[in-house]
Image (cartoon, coloured by chain):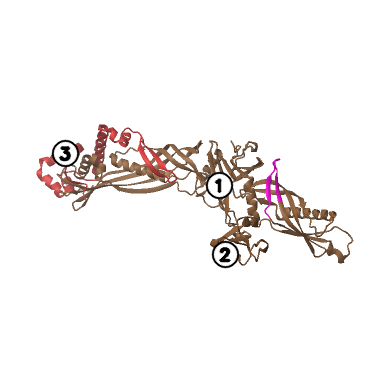
């Protein structure tokens, strides 16, 4: 079963994930068509051939940049429609998430929840 | 405060005292007493000495009757059969009535009301006209009976239990041992009215209270137990320090997200997955196969604060400390192979981990929490939590659909695993120790009146079958009443047996005496 089929990702949209090292690699890839083929065949080896050492530090930097962008994406979405995202609105504002619960008598089972 | 500032006040109605005296009588707690008295006459020849001895045996036909007098003292009336043996073998029987003066006490070791016998006097001796006894003989016999009763009261039966165990000293979820039971300090006992008497005790070293401020809160029920709020807090503090109930729990969960739940985030989500997977350096078409989250938490519970309010409500507040983690995964199928170290490749299916978040030691506050005080099925006073505001200081940047799910789950786990708020141990123990008699309490009153909780209940007992002197066959085709040791009694099927402590009650219920063991009550 597939949740979403055949989504072609627009590379222009992904440019917002660029950072300095990545921009350099992207420039080289756009200049050298063979480099794109190399990426398809052996991505890590191709990067290293271009002088990008794929080590823990590189991976850590990549992860950091991704999550920074993901955070920016999330904040932008919340800012556009805060009423749709009550929990995230609280998180973005630096406030604790407040959930009002009612509990089924004698059971400790939550009967209803409401984000306040 | 109706509890007079004591931690616990127990009150007992005269009716239940009489019921327990009947129960005690049925269980054989008033044994036949017998002895002999030697007339203090000197110079009696040896051959005549045996004639100086008067033997006596007193048995109780009926249960004693208890009374709180209008002068607020306690008395018990006993009607018994007294058999004397004189002159080496002549016996005659008298019916006698005694009145005993009693002093009430509350036994802190056993948590029962009892009375200690102080003195006894003979009220009436029925003359047996057949013997035409002279009045001075009757007087001497009275003296003998008084001496005998005095010895019986001091040696054989010095006190009688009047109530079931009114509250336990054992709390739930506690380690074994006396050190983990509530310690009681005796306060005082007071007769409040001709219907009710009260005993007050304090817990865990507290010494306050004024017995003259204690008032009747039984509302006509058999027993009442009142607990002061300060005592309740002492009990909860004591319980929290020692309980074996888990104060932390580790739970995990997993959830697959279906398409409708994140349709609002699909564009961003695919961007993130592809960016992580390819850095955007490779053209790719993606099938998003599955999105799921694994999450877990270790929750550390802290003791709650509570405040009793009117209408049996309780306001609570407190916090839990939580270590929380969450990993989000997406499984994608790509038309381009990707192998650069951060993702797994399984043929053309990859699992991306866009979120791997954890936070330790955050404090989740429970605010505006309310509950109701209830008596649970074990007769313990507990709090049913009914609502609360749960504040979670979480700074995770996650799409709302994932954040919502994880927060919902975490809130459920906090509430479901909250340790109980134990206010007081079992009120009115359900068995009478060293017996088969069980006690069932019907609670007709539970009132929280801010500084105290007042409970009142009526009591029924069952399981008297082991002791009852009379067994009846309630099969409509038989309806016979037997003495316990009658061989016909043992032939009654268990399902048809009815037990009676008093023969009058059995006869009033329509049973006919057995021709063999109760011929005087057999009507054919």
Q: Residue furthest front?
A: B524
Label 3, label 1: how far apart the Cα atoms are = 78 Å
Residues marked 2 and 1, same chain: yes
Q: Quadrant of residue B282?
A: top left
Q: Quadrant of residue B501?
A: bottom right
Label 2 or label 1, whichever comes before in sequence order: 1
Tell me where residue B6 appears, x and y as whole percent.
Answer: 60, 39
Q: Residue at x 19, y 44 (%)?
A: B278
Tell me where residue A27 appears, x and y as whole percent.
Answer: 14, 39
Q: Are marks 3 and 1 in contact (CB under 8 Å)?
A: no
Which quarter of the figure is the N terminus of chain B placed in? top right
Give the number of the mark in front: 2 or 1: 2
Q: Is B12 placed left or right of A75 in the picture?
A: right
Q: Colour of chain B?
A: brown
**Residue B492 numbered tag:** 2
Disc 1 is placed on an element classified as loop
**Residue B427 numbered tag:** 1
- In the rendered image, which residue does mark 3 sit on? A24
Q: Is B416 placed left or right of B355 in the picture?
A: right
Give the number of the mark in front: 3 or 2: 2
Q: Is residue B204 visible?
A: no
Looking at the picture, tell me which residue is in the foreground, A61 or B437: B437
Write the start and end of the magenta stretch as one range: B62-77
Q: Is B339 placed left or right of B320 in the picture?
A: left
Disc 3 is placed on an element classified as helix
The chain to which mark 2 is attached is: B
Looking at the picture, tell me which residue is in the foreground, B226 or B134: B134
Which quarter of the figure is the C terminus of chain B placed in? bottom right
Q: Colour of chain A?
A: red
């Amino acid at each position: 079963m597939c949740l979403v089929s055949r989504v072609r990702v627009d590379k222009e949209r992904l440019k917002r994930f660029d950072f300095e090292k990545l921009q350099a690699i992207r420039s080289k890839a756009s200049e050298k068509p063979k480099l794109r083929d190399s990426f398809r065949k052996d991505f890590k080896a191709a990067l290293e051939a271009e002088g990008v050492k794929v080590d823990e530090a590189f991976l850590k930097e990549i992860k950091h940049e991704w999550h920074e962008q993901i955070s920016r994406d999330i904040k932008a979405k919340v800012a556009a429609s805060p009423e749709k995202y009550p929990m995230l609105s609280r998180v973005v504002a630096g406030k604790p998430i407040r959930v009002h619960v009612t509990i089924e008598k004698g059971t400790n089972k939550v009967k209803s929840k409401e984000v306040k | 405060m109706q509890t007079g500032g004591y931690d616990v006040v127990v009150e007992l109605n005269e009716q239940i005292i009489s019921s327990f005296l009947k129960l005690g009588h049925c269980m054989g707690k008033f044994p036949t007493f017998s002895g002999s008295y030697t007339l203090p006459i000197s110079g009696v020849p040896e051959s005549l000495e045996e004639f100086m001895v008067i033997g006596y045996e007193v048995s109780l036909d009926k249960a004693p009757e208890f009374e709180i007098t209008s002068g607020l003292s306690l008395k018990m009336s006993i009607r018994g059969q007294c058999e004397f043996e004189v002159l080496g073998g002549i016996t005659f029987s008298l019916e006698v009535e005694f009145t005993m003066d009693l002093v009430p006490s509350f036994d802190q070791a056993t948590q029962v009301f009892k009375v200690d016998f102080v003195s006894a006097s003979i009220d009436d001796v029925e003359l047996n006209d057949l013997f035409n006894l002279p009045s001075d003989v009757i007087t001497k016999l009275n003296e003998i009976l008084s001496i005998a009763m005095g010895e019986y009261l001091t040696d054989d039966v010095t006190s009688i239990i009047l109530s079931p165990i009114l509250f336990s000293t054992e709390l739930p979820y506690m380690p074994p041992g006396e050190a983990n039971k509530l310690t009681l300090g005796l306060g005082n006992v007071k007769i409040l009215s001709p219907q009710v008497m009260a005993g007050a005790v304090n817990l865990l070293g507290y010494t306050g209270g004024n017995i003259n401020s204690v008032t009747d809160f039984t509302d006509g029920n058999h027993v009442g137990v009142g607990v002061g709020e300060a005592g309740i807090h002492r009990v909860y503090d004591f319980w929290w320090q020692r309980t074996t109930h888990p104060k932390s729990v580790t739970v995990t969960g997993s959830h697959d997200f279906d398409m409708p739940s994140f349709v609002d985030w699909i564009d961003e989500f695919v961007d993130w997955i592809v960016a992580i997977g390819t850095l955007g350096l490779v053209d790719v078409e993606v099938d998003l196969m599955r999105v799921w989250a694994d999450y877990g938490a270790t929750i550390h519970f802290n003791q709650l604060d509570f405040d009793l309010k009117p209408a049996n409500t309780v306001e609570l507040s407190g916090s839990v400390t939580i270590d929380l983690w969450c990993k989000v995964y997406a499984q994608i199928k790509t038309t381009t192979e990707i192998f650069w170290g951060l993702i797994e490749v399984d043929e053309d299916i990859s699992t991306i981990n866009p979120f791997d978040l954890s936070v330790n030691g955050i404090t989740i506050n429970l605010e505006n929490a309310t509950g109701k005080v209830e008596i649970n099925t074990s007769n313990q006073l507990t709090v049913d939590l009914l609502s609360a505001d749960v504040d979670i200081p979480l700074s995770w940047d996650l799409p709302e659909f994932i954040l919502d799910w994880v927060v919902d789950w975490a809130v459920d786990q906090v509430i479901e695993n909250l340790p109980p708020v134990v206010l007081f141990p079992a009120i009115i123990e359900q068995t009478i120790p060293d017996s088969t008699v069980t006690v069932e309490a019907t609670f007709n009153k539970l009132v929280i009146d801010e500084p105290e909780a007042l409970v009142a209940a009526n009591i029924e007992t069952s399981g008297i079958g082991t002791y009852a002197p009379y067994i009846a066959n309630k099969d409509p085709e038989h309806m016979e009443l037997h003495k316990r040791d009658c061989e016909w009694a043992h032939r009654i099927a268990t399902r048809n047996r009815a037990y009676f402590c008093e023969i009058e009650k059995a006869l009033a219920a329509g049973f006919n005496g057995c021709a063999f063991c109760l011929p005087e009550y057999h009507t054919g």
